[in-house]
Image (cartoon, rainbow, N blue to C red):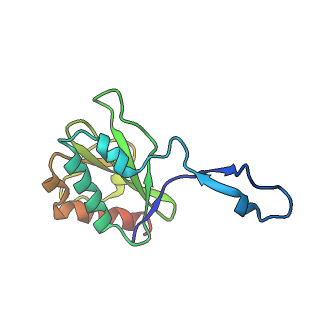
Amino acid sequence: MIRRVRGPALGVLDAGASAGGEDPAARIRVVASASDISLTDQLEKVPPRVRPVVKAALDSVRKAAPKNAEEVLYRTSQPRSKSAMWKLVRFTAGGANVIGVGTFPAHATIWFYRGRELDDGSGLLQGSGKDSRFLSLRSAADAEEPAVRTLVRKAFKLGGA
């Protein structure tokens, strides 16, 4: 099962607690940070026409990811520019970034942190950067292609999972 990680919460001293002799943990209540936002909240802000594609991309990665994978939410808001990607989630294994899922106004993207090293027999990977490569997904069916899950499995294997 993928473990979801949401970043640290702020500890706040409870005003009614005394400082002497009590267990310190009993005096702290956890309050979510102002920048803490759930994936559900973020998905509600994704443009409606691309939201099903983003959800399908997340489902495909989750289904193909190994049990020790961690899902880490980005704490970002929707970009002002339509040409900038909104990074939503990254998946890690053993502390290393493996895959990310983000969106543009008209399509979703799965990117592979070590994509240059992936054996892409399908020819789906795009990009020519130093390390990463990506897939542009224009429909939910694109995200559900078996070749996408194969690339996800290969990426986690390459990442040591």
Dividing the picture into quarters, in which one does residue 29 lie? bottom right
Confirm whether residue 113 shows in the render: no
Q: Is residue 81 above or below residue 127?
A: above
160 vs 107, nearest the viewer: 107
Residue that appears at 17% across and 65% down: 146
Percent position of residue 37, x then y: 44, 46
Percent position of residue 83, x then y: 29, 30
Residue that appears at 80% across and 64% down: 22
Dividing the picture into quarters, in which one does residue 64 lie? bottom left
27 horizontally vs 61: left or right: right
Q: Residue furthest front?
A: 16
23 horizontally vs 4: left or right: right
Residue that appears at 36% across and 32% down: 79
46 vs 70, nearest the viewer: 46
Residue that appears at 40% across and 53% down: 90
108 vs 49, nearest the viewer: 49
Percent position of residue 98, x then y: 40, 57
Q: Is residue 1 above or below residue 128?
A: below
150 horizontally vs 7: left or right: left
54 vs 118, nearest the viewer: 54
